[in-house]
Amino acid sequence: MSENLATILTDTREKHGERTALKLDDNEVSYEMLDEAGKRLAGLLEEKGFEQGDRVGIMLPNVPYFAVIYYGVLRAGGTVVPMNPLLKGREVEFYLTDPGVKIFFAWHDFAQAAEKGAEAAGAELILVIPKGAGEAGHPAGTGEFEELVGEADPVDEMADVAIDDTAVILYTSGTTGKPKGAELTHSNLKRNTEIAAGLFSLDEGTITLGALPLFHSFGQTCGLNATMFGGGTLTLIPRFDPAKALEIIQRDKVSVFEGVPTMYTAMLNLDTRDDYDVSCLEVCASGGSAMPGEVLRGFEEAFNCKVLEGYGLSETSPVASFNHPDKERKIGSIGTPIEGVEMKVVDDDGNEVDQGEVGEILIKGHNVMKGYWDREEATQESIKDGWFYTGDMAKIDDEGYFFIVDRKKELIIRGGYNVYPREVEEVLYEHPSVLEAAVIGVEDENMGEEVGAAVVLKDGEEVSEEDIKGYVKEEVANYKYPRKVWFVDELPKGPTGKILKREIEVPGEVEAGSS
């Protein structure tokens, strides 16, 4: 049996070739069409001088072409380097140069950044121009993508790959320095895909909402690959919009929604949410960052759907733990480890902490990456004796459920006391006027660090900084409540909608209150 990750598509095609694999509004792509297009894409690569093991960049939004290129590259034995379509020229250059990308597929709307980056990196650029998009301003010879692929000879054979060959290099944003490329093997991703399909109940009758970016590990493994493995349909949204998401759930009878907490928040707080019939929803999975309990409870009540939280990282393919559908669900918990994966919580010396104590999460199993591309030192720092050091702080209860407390790097030490931002954020989200909030450490002469909160209010709400401080002060120990509060129109977010705390600006006039 082939280890190639692309077999999740070919195996399903054999059973359900006529079924719809992907949908984008009125456009539907069957498993047969997707697999045939992938074969020709592999042929196009061969025409371009591609050799097995070469890295191929993909910079596309959530459109069916992403899957065509993804499975075509894997079929040919290449390594996929997925990239955020919103990258600028110099960033594109890094993502191409660092892994030595030879061929680069980019969406026509992002031609300027793609051309600049590809030229600097010496990669061959193929612009993906769909029918009707026109070619004005694009380099001669790119042609319409369908034509380009359709004229290539199909490659029927699946490249034979070793179990530890790299299938995908996923670049992690990294809180410091340049991004690092997590090398995920065919085995890593195939096993994680199979388990995710089971956890999320993805089978041939399932319609999954493809709102998560396909270039990101969550959307790729749990959305694209798990749906293709199960034989269901992935209905795509190129750019997340809460009203559009609810419209598609109603229109396509979506049964599985996978999202990050900010997506749930946006849908929950949409004025017109009751206009949509979303009774078809059966499973809602959340990951990417911790979901505030208030949002989870509110979403379940509003949409009559159970939300199951899970946990993982790009380096773990990504799923590591989940609130398993057949076991008790605990609000605020990331559940228990998935099959074949071990997790433990340790102190700074690597010793396991007592139950209920806070420590760093370590992960071991078939989902842990091979290492960081061309970063031997970083790999050795993060993987020791097979255990991946996540940098996430958590505690375990008496039934083995894990509860994330915060990122190790986001811990605030105020006057010698540890303050975990998530605990304070949970309280902020309970305030009736608060839409979103992020708690960060702010430099302070007296305390070393002070607790700061950037707050987004719901539309039409008015509340003072003192009101917010007072509200939180009632709910947490005195040293934990935010002395510095400021209001913002929106919080900076990454491609999946995850709040980027490192990019939050602290206004100069924000002063600490009394201690």
Image (cartoon, rainbow, N blue to C red):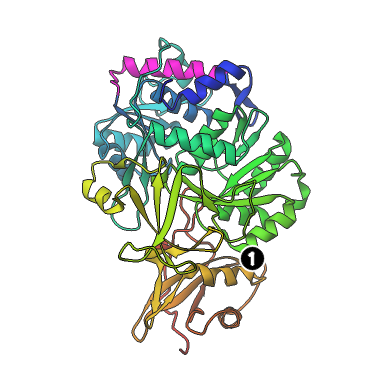
Query: Could you tell me which residue is drawn at 27 percent across and 33 percent down?
Result: 119
42 is within the stretch colored magenta: yes
Front residue of this view, candidates 83 and 183: 183
Q: Eyeballing the image, is 31 above or below 287?
A: above
Q: Decide if residue 134 is in sight here.
A: no
Residue 101 located within the stretch drawn in magenta: no
In this rendering, position of residue 131 left or right of residue 346? right
Q: Residue furthest bottom?
A: 514
- Can residue 297 be seen in this snapshot? yes
Q: Residue furthest left?
A: 377
Residue numbers of the magenta segment? 32-52
Q: Residue 412 placed where, x, y %?
A: 40, 73
Q: Which residue is mark 1?
A: 458
Residue 443, image quadrant: bottom left
Q: Quadrant of the N terminus?
A: top left
Camera-nearest residue between 106 and 164:
164
Q: Secondary structure at mark 1?
A: loop
Q: Residue at x 66, y 33 (%)?
A: 206
Residue 12, by quadrant, is top right
Is 398 located above or below residue 101 in the figure?
A: below
Residue 316: image location, x then y, percent = 41, 45
Which three-letter amino acid code belongs to the residue tagged 1?
A: Lys
x and y percent of residue 319 in the render?
48, 45
Front residue (pair 458, 431): 431
Where 36 sits versus 277, above or below? above
Circle 1 Cα neighbour tier, 10 Å, few/some/many (<14 / 14–19 / ≥20): some
Counting from the top left corner in percent of width and height, residue 404 is at 49, 61
